[in-house]
Amino acid sequence: MNEFEVLEKSYKLAQANTQSKSFADVDYLIEKIDGNKSIVSAVVTSLLKKIIEPKQDVRLHRVDFENGYSARVLDTKFTSPFFKTHFPKYANKESSFLTLATREQIKWTKDEGINLKIRDKKLRESFLNIFEMIEVKQQNPNEILVYLFAKLIELSKVDEAIFEIVNTQKTKVVNINSIVEMLQKHFVIKQSSRLPVVAIYSIYELLLPKFERFKNKKLLPLQVHTSSDKHGFGDIEIYDEDDKPFEIIEIKHNIPIDKFLIFDIVKKIQTVKINRYYVLTTFPNCFTDLESEKSVVEYIANIKQEKNVDIIANVIIATIKYYLRFVDDYSFFIETYTKNLVNDAKSSTEIKNFHLEKWAEILESYK
């Protein structure tokens, strides 16, 4: 069998879920997958290699190791496309071997693996234990792979159930203030930096067709916020008919805007001509104090004069309030935000299940 056939066969066996043997170390990897999907993908790639070439020591995941192989090439060609098809939420954009935890020149043995850049010590131990099982204890890699896929299928079913609950939840929104209250309640929960991005993106999705300014312009799909292979100029990007950046929105969560932040933006866009660049924050009042505000305003004015770039710094809630005035039906925004939350959760791990559950709870409270 070739690599794709091995993965598909293991997936079908996992769907049947007839295997009685379990692996606690795999369980822990799946439990921590939201912030460590590269680790899980690297394990799948290694198991795949071991099944295809049983004599290969898969702890030697780089060609610059003696008797090593390129796990990154295998991951890019086979594992990553497989995950995008069957487990898109837990798929890497290009390869799982772009993070320090997987790409460093460290053998995945018990002795050397202690130096891996994996913060969770138990996760690192479970990761290395799997390779110990394969290479030292001669555990059948097929059994581990099928079990891992079965756990991912089980996790995906839980995700789908939550997606369905959120999608079917209805609410009655009467005014802009109600929407602002709902969003503020949503933004304050933990690990919520992605939520304001989705909110602003949803507004742009509704308003782009309405304004002459955005005629023939296109709103690019949201990129994965935390991806190690992320490209682009900001969190939300609008391009012109020549496929050039036109309007960029950078969103900061609980971070005040200061002169240094603006300096970083100018440096990032120095090689391109951008018509307008918004930097929005959930930090109250936008700036730490009046002196900082004055410094930023003066700096932005100088940039406009020297480089002819409009940089606009503002509080995100104030921006949402302003833009919502141009939305014909407020329920359209709620529906669009809900849709984008679910879509983002389906394609990445930045929107967590508890974010969706909290939004469903908020929708219910505004019925």
Image (cartoon, helix red, strand yellow):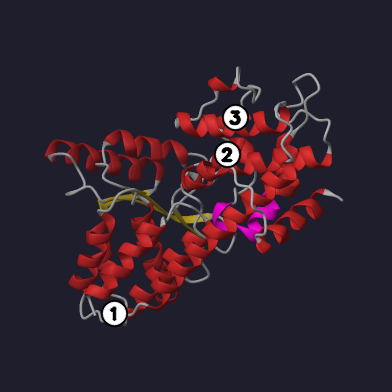
Q: Secondary structure at mark 2?
A: helix
* Mark 2 nearby-residue class (10 Å; few <14, some 14–19, many ≥20): many
> Which of the marked residues, 1 or 2, is nearer the chain's N terminus?
2
Residue 257's spot in the image, x, y percent?
26, 42
> Which of the marked residues, 1 or 3, is nearer the chain's N terminus?
3
> Please, is residue 226 above or below residue 264 in the view?
below
Quadrant where the C terminus lies?
bottom left
Report, in whole angstroms, how far the alpha carbon at label 1 lies from the one at label 3: 48 Å
User: Which residue occupies the foreground of this view, 92 or 58?
Assistant: 58
Residue on which the image places disc 3 = 128
Left or right of 51? Residue 242 is left
User: Which residue occupies the foreground of this view, 333 or 64?
Assistant: 64
Residue 108's spot in the image, x, y percent?
64, 26
* Mark 1 nearby-residue class (10 Å; few <14, some 14–19, many ≥20): some
> Which of the marked residues, 2 or 3, is nearer the chain's N terminus?
2
Say if the magenta span includes residue 215: no
Tag 3: amino acid: Leu
Report, in whole angstroms, how far the alpha carbon at label 2 lies from the one at label 3: 11 Å
The answer to whether the residue labelled 1 contacts the one labelled 2, judged by CB atoms less than 8 Å apart, is no
Indicate which label's residue lies in the foreground, 1 or 3: 3
Left or right of 246? Residue 284 is left
Indicate which label's residue lies in the foreground, 1 or 2: 2
> Please, is residue 327 above or below residue 232 in the view?
below
Which portion, as a residue range, is magenta? 80-90
Tag 1: amino acid: Thr
Q: Secondary structure at mark 1?
A: loop
Residue on which the image places disc 1 = 171
Q: Is residue 250 something that shows in the picture?
A: yes
Residue on which the image places disc 2 = 39
